[in-house]
Image (tube, grey):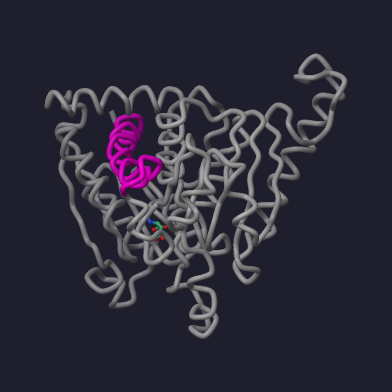
Amino acid sequence: MRLKHILTTQQFSDKKTLEELFKLANKFEIWDKKRKIPQFLKGMISASVFYEPSTRTRFSFESAMLKLGGEVLTTENAGHFSSAIKGESLEDSIRIIGGYCDAIVIRHYEVGAAERAAKVSLVPIINAGDGAGEHPTQALLDIYTIWKEVGRIDGLKIAMLGDLLHGRTIHSLIHLLPLFKNIEIFLVSPKELKIPQEYKSFLRERNSRNAAAFLEFPSLAPNKSKLSPAGSLGNIKFTETEDINRVLPQIDVLYTTRIQKERFKSLKTYERVKNSFVIDEKSLKLLPKKSIIMHPLPRVSEINPIVDNDQRAAYFRQAKNGLYIRMALLKMLLA
Ligand code: NCD
């Protein structure tokens, strides 16, 4: 599939593109270890335009570009160090920056900012996080990590834990999961931070679309006698709960998230919920031996550092995978 911009994971509507991406990321990892990376992007320039802080996303995108032979322009606090401070609109900034580079990686505090940028941009726009909206490249590296660590995605039970209201990585991940079979998700959060309705509607709508397709073409149904919404092709069973201890023993993947302090209207509420869930030694005892623990990072207090020594802690490996997925994405977009 030819990618034009990367704005949302909803663009990734077929498994083939993901397979292509994962294979390429894998090749880049091998080439990188041998220090023999084909210079696919020689002569090209990417611009990182970040209106919100970042460590992993910006550095891994820039490292990816440099490793592929390209070059980077960067502003890490675009709200202050670009003409935004003088009142220039996002659209005008993008029009101008696009004239100096071949792709723009943008992180912004407003939902929909990347889409607005794409409307006026002459070069590909990559959404590196738009407020509490989406973070598609993170979700792609998350799925890649699950595939690498567990060996499959179909049939997995995944718990998403923490700030499901503001967590853009969760939002992007949810849009990807219907590509896989028999997934079950547990949405575990304090009640103030439950997943927005639109993501539940998305899952329900996907499930009913599948059920309708099976009724029309029964041969598509994996189990013809059982057209239940849960557990068939592309269907996702999901449960909302606050009871993490009941969920932990049942899952293959624990996806933990940071409580997004910067998005709270009231710091009082933040203080009340910030330590609702902490993964520690006790949680490790409840988690199955073959499960993995993920986190997009940065973590604050959601995962006790004692967990880092456990083989199931996959979050640092997950962050490293970001480099290879972003190399593959840049190649697919630009080469
Ligand atoms: C995430 C983000 O920015 O949304 N970080 C990342 O890109 N790895 C998660 C977070 O900030 O909590």
Measured as percent of width and height from the top left, residue 272 is found at 54, 80
Q: Position of residue 316 (x, y in %)?
A: 31, 46
273 in magenta:
no
Q: Residue at x 68, y 58 (%)?
A: 241
The quadrant of the image that shows the C terminus is top left
Is residue 240 positioned above or below 223 on the image?
A: below
The structure residue drawn at horizontal position 70% and vertical position 26%, both measured from the top left corner, is: 233
Q: Main secondary structure of the magenta part?
A: helix
Q: Is 57 left or right of 164, judged from the image as shown?
A: left
Identified at 31% across, 65% down, the residue is 53
Q: Which residues are magenta?
A: 309-334
Inspect the magenta stretch and tell me whether residue 317 lies in it: yes
Residue 56 rendering spot, x and y as whole percentages = 29, 52
Task: Name the residue nearer the viewer: 221 or 51.
Answer: 221
Q: Is residue 302 left or right of residue 181?
A: left
Query: In terms of image quadrants, where is residue 70?
Result: top left
